[in-house]
Amino acid sequence: MNNFFYLASQSPRRKAILDTLCAPYKLINLVEGSNSTADFDETPLENEDPVEYVKRTALMKANAGWKHLVDHDLEKAPVLAIDTTVTIDKDILGKPLDAAHAHAMLQRLSGRQHQVLTAVTMKQADIVAQELCTTNVCIRKLKRHEIEAYISTNEPFGKAGGYGIQGLASIFVSHIAGSYSGVVGLPIYETSELIKKFGFLLL
């Protein structure tokens, strides 16, 4: 039985959640990208369903994490990998490429409800388990100057859908139904249930 697991994520928000839970983890540094030196590529497939996309990407990260352990002859322990995406009208809203892209995303979310999907996967050798968290989020109607001011803070960049609910964007959220921590990037309930299957208890 392992006394720790690996976290295949560079997200400071996910690390902060696990630290709050006193979870026994170590980090794996993976590289995302489309070139041959990258460990994984988050680019959606053509016409890919958002649910299938987020589940596939989380599994891909877990597989890449396990491969990293094998390739670098590291101590073998379960690998926890997560992917979060924002979807509206069955379209996937990834991380904004630039200010114009972020503006278009936020304008699209303005005054509407969208879904935040977070897939959590744990892998150890050939054993794989996965949980999916779906949360409905309502963004109030945003004025142009509010969107521009928010983008100027640089908070939208590096975040699916172009906003971070744990930051300044919280003033835009009028309603949430589901897991707040799932929107942040690591659903606590689903994650705790998943890691229990691999022998880890948080309490």
Image: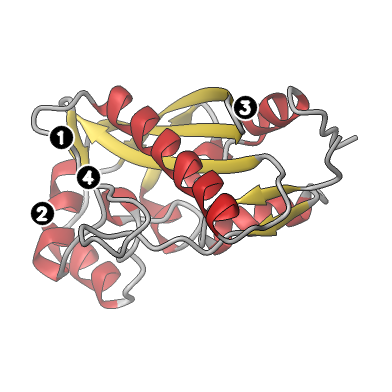
Report the side of 108 relative to 13 (left or right).
left
Instruction: Indicate which label's residue lies in the foreground, 1 or 3.
Output: 1
Q: Residue 50 location, x and y as percent?
A: 26, 28
The residue beneath circle 2 is 104
Residue at image point 15% right, 35% down: 45
Instruction: Indicate which label's residue lies in the foreground, 1 or 4.
Output: 1
For the residue pair 36 and 26, the one nearer the viewer reads as: 36
| Spatial CA span between label 2 and label 4 | 14 Å
The residue beneath circle 3 is 190
Report the side of 21 relative to 172 (left or right).
right
Instruction: Indicate which label's residue lies in the foreground, 2 or 4.
Output: 2
Q: Amino acid at mark 1?
A: Leu
| Spatial CA span between label 2 and label 3 | 31 Å
| Spatial CA span between label 1 and label 4 | 31 Å
Instruction: Indicate which label's residue lies in the foreground, 2 or 3.
Output: 3
The residue beneath circle 4 is 141
